[in-house]
Image: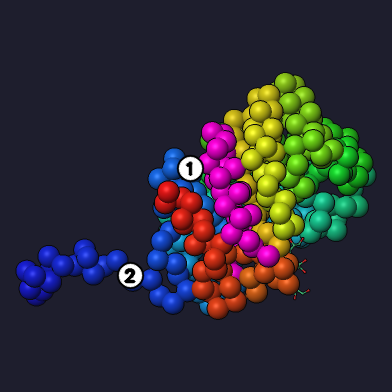
Amino acid sequence: MKSSLALLLAPLTAVAAPTAGQAAESIDELIKAKDKLYYGTCTDQGLLTSGQSAAIIQTNFGQVTPENSMKWDQTENSRGQFNLAQADYLVDWATENNKSIRGHTLVWHPQLAGWVNNIRDPAELTTVIQDHVTELVTRYKGKIRAWDVVNEIFNEDGSLRSSVFSNVLGEDFVRIAFEAARAADPDAVLYINDYNLDQPNYGKTQGMIRNVAKWIAAGVPIDGIGSQGHLTAGLASQAGATIAALAATEGIKEVAFTEVDIVGASQQDYTAVTQACLDEPKCVGITVWGVRDSDSWRAQNNPLLFDGSFNPKPAYNAIVDLLSS
Ligand code: G3I
């Protein structure tokens, strides 16, 4: 039987003190206090079950994106045979830990199962896209807040990139994918996502704005634009102008920074991206592409907010200071 004093103190002692690595202040809690939805990161089962990524995400982040487990080569590497164990793990972990989820990504030309790349018949590819999208979005209906429905479909000049999707179906694959996603989960927020959307007048930025406005006007259910934000040092200086230009796209309901990592991770660059989201009413949040530098796809650039020992870097603390002001 617990003493009355122990019961009285229980709520206070129940909050786990930050372990080595976790930051005392949560940038997610701080950005939520600024009426944004999340400061998130990407992860997957391997990282959640080793090191301190899980502890840091639990304490310091409010949203997760599967880094690889929901990509086509991982989920449907053979037609009609779905392997969703790792995707399920991510979704279950996020749900249990009350983290918002961005599904990533349904239609993307790399990490694409080989059997899809070999399709040449428009009707067959249409069915294949519809079946793939329907399977994943239905499975996580009500659990995944937003989906990257199509990813990296433009060339640097804003024209449509050559892929099996565009080569066989032209731009109609965009409508096919988004309509299937909407039908599977009408409440999910549906994004088109891309990189190098970092300067307002850049060809790809203008191509995104022009085509998304056209597709929405034609009835394609696109809700949001994701700007990945894989930045070189100093490029964050244009983040505010560019996210505002993307948000101004006719028909777009929200925007987000979806995969931020920045060469050198300067305090100035990370606070510039954070401020850009704060300043844009339609910007719902920021996702950095990983927790610690050594787990990054571009580890050599030390681009993230935690170092190889899972300790917060000056850029993390600079974001805390900005969001606390
Ligand atoms: O799972 C296999 C493993 O079985 C094998 O032993 C190992 C070595 O060959 O490869 C593993 O797959 C790797 C996978 O990451 C999981 O670790 C792939 O080779 C590797 O190419 C893949 O890299 C991912 C990359 O996307 C692939 O395009 C990165 O982790 C991931 O951070 C990166 O993320 C992308 C976004 O999805 C889209 N935007 C750009 C961003 C950076 O490229």
Circle on res. 283 = none
Residue 154: percent from the left, percent from the top?
A: 83, 42
Identify the element where label 2 is drawn: loop
Residue 158: percent from the left, percent from the top?
A: 85, 37
Q: CA distance from mark 2 to mark 1?
A: 25 Å
In the image, residue 276 lies in the stretch drawn in magenta = yes
Q: Are marks 2 and 1 in contact (CB under 8 Å)?
A: no
Circle on res. 36 = 1
- Most extreme residue toward the top is 217
Mark nearer the N terminus (2 vs 1)? 2
Return the residue nearer the eye: 228 or 27: 27
The residue under the point 74% across, 57% down is 232
Where is residue 189, by image quadrant? top right
Which quarter is ligand 1 in?
bottom right
Where is residue 125, by image quadrant? top right
Where is residue 65, by image quadrant? bottom right
Residue 239: percent from the left, percent from the top?
A: 67, 44
In the image, residue 250 lies in the stretch drawn in magenta = no
Return the residue nearer the eye: 292 or 48: 292
Residue 237: percent from the left, percent from the top?
A: 68, 47
Q: Which amino acid does the dot numbered 2 rest on?
A: Ala
The residue under the point 60% across, 49% down is 272
Callout 1 crowding tier (Cα within 10 Å): few <14, some 14–19, many ≥20:
some
- Most extreme residue toward the left is 4
Residues in magenta, as a range? 264-292
Circle on res. 16 = 2
Compared to residue 63, the image places residue 153 above or below, namely above
The residue under the point 85% across, 58% down is 114
Q: Nearer the viewer, mark 2 or mark 1?
A: 1
Q: Which amino acid does the dot numbered 1 rest on?
A: Lys
Return the residue nearer the eye: 217 or 90: 217
Callout 2 crowding tier (Cα within 10 Å): few <14, some 14–19, many ≥20:
few
